[in-house]
Amino acid sequence: MKGISRIDSNHTHGWFVRVFLNAQTHSKMFSDGVHGGQDKALKAAIKYKDEYERKHPPSYAATRMRLQPMKNNTSGVVGVSETFSRSRNGNILPCFNVSWRPRPNVSRSKSFFLSKYGSREAAFEAAIKFRREREAEIIAGIES
């Protein structure tokens, strides 16, 4: 079960619930002793997790897109990163990489090479435009 794990150590026996939401972790322990056994503790843990997720729906899971850039994002645009690739002869090719999730559990990416677009700014703008188009497709797929 995602987000629920069993803990059996010297003095701790129970189910541990973890819910990840907006870069924060919410956790709670369901002890066998407090809940009257392993099965009852598991049922309580599942009920708690389901209720918590219902009250606090994760925005990322619903859209398959981040709404805010991660702390380590240097481009300032979600899903667009500045990086480089290597050619077959080993030359470094600067580019912007766009990543997106067209379906649950499926990742895609596309590179926009500065050499093709003539400048860093042109490649960056093309990458942003492409990313916005993918976001629109994802949202249209969710709403239909």
Image (tube, helix red, strand yellow):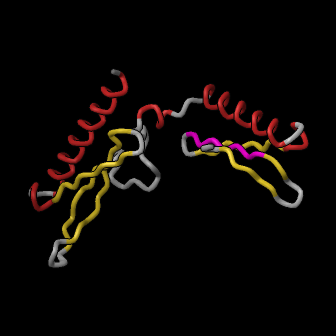
On screen, residue 32 versus residue 129, left or right, reads right
Q: Is residue 95 magenta?
A: no
Residue 44 vertical position relative to residue 115 in the rendered view, above or below: above
| Residue 53 drawn at (x, y percent) | 61, 31
Where is the C terminus found, in terms of image quarters? top left
| Residue 24 drawn at (x, y percent) | 60, 45
In which quadrant of the rendered view does residue 27 lie? top right
Q: Main secondary structure of the magenta part?
A: strand
Residue in the image at 63% along x and 41% along y: 19
125 or 44: which is nearer to us?
Answer: 44
Where is the N terminus found, in terms of image quarters? top right
2 or 65: which is nearer to us?
Answer: 2
In which quadrant of the rendered view does residue 134 lie? top left
Residue extending farthest front? 39
Residue in the image at 23% along x and 52% along y: 110
On screen, residue 85 versus residue 61, left or right, reads left
102 or 25: which is nearer to us?
Answer: 102
Q: Which residues are magenta?
A: 15-21
Number of numbered tags placed on the structure image: 0
On screen, residue 60 versus residue 55, left or right, reads left
Residue 54 vertical position relative to residue 78 in the rendered view, above or below: above
Residue in the image at 71% along x and 30% along y: 47
| Residue 117 drawn at (x, y percent) | 10, 54
93 or 72: which is nearer to us?
Answer: 93
| Residue 56 drawn at (x, y percent) | 60, 29
Residue extending farthest bottom? 89
On screen, residue 91 versus residue 72, left or right, reads left
